[in-house]
Amino acid sequence: PDASGPSTKASTQPWPSPSTGISSDDSASSQTEGCCPRSSHDATEYADGLLPREVPDRTDIDCFLPSLSKVLDHLIVLGEEREKTMRRKPARSRFHSVTVPNITVSDYLLRLSKFFHCSGECFVIALVYLDRAVKESSYSASLADAEEEKESSPFNITRLNVHRLLLTALTLAAKYYDDCYYANKRY
């Protein structure tokens, strides 16, 4: 932003960012009513007479987590429908729990965002990782069906494995995107 006009970017971030030192506690008090925080500026007009557009911070976790929860719920429905139509019983992986966890996906996402301290981008990357895992296993399973030699079943996201998969994908995303690492010279 230059000195001629007010900033159009929201002034707060809901979590600490590697590039800024703003914490979530500082941002909570400056959010306005609604889903996304708005920039705090007076009604200064630009030279053309228009008011500056208020652009919500695209990384606002409060806006993003409900959408991510709906996407994961949809993946669970698809995965469980796929498992019902399989000819044989689906294989269980190390990610499957014996019983369905008592916490909903939505509440689990809120818990992860509160205690994991990773950026919002990590949640997007984690979703990409989960999507790739499902697509890759479906592709591998279709190849195995064509060859009829290998015993392979597609990997589905279900209520029994979504929590562990999400935690693993988010950990990998945070290690990839948020981790601060040093060159070998430093050591």
Image (spheres, rainbow, N blue to C red):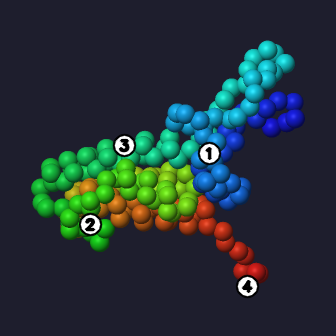
Q: How far apart are marks 4 and 3 (CA)?
A: 44 Å
CB contact under 8 Å: marks 2 and 4: no
Q: What SS does tag 4 mark?
A: loop
Query: Which residue in the structure is indicated by mark 3?
Result: 70
The amino acid beneath tag 4 is Tyr
Residue 14: give x, y in percent of width and height. Answer: 59, 50
Residue highlighted by disc 4:
187
Q: Can residue 137 be seen in this view?
A: no
Which dot, 4 or 3, sits closer to the camera? 3
The mark that comes first in sequence, 2 or 4, is 2
Where is mark 1, residue-wise? 29
Tally the numbered discs: 4
For marks 1 and 2, give the one nearer the viewer.
1
Mark closer to the chain start, 4 or 3: 3
Q: In this view, does 116 lie above or below 69?
A: below
In the image: residue 47, left or right of residue 92:
right
Distance, label 2 to label 3, CA atoms, is 21 Å
Q: Which of 180 and 62 is in front in this view?
A: 62
Residue 143: % across, % down? 28, 58
Nearer to the camera, 61 or 125? 61
Q: Earlier in the sequence, mark 1 or mark 2?
A: 1
Whether 110 is drawn above or below 151: the answer is above
Quadrant location of residue 132?
A: bottom left
Q: How crowded is mark 3: few (under 14 residues within 10 Å), some or many (20 or more)?
A: few
Q: In terms of secondary structure, where does tag 1 sit? A: loop
Disc on the earlier residue, 2 or 3? 3
Q: Which amino acid does label 2 sit on?
A: His
Which of 65/89 is in front?
65
Q: Name the residue under label 2.
A: 96
Task: Give the quarter of the image for residue 91.
Answer: bottom left
**Where, by quadrant of the figure, is residue 86 drawn?**
bottom left
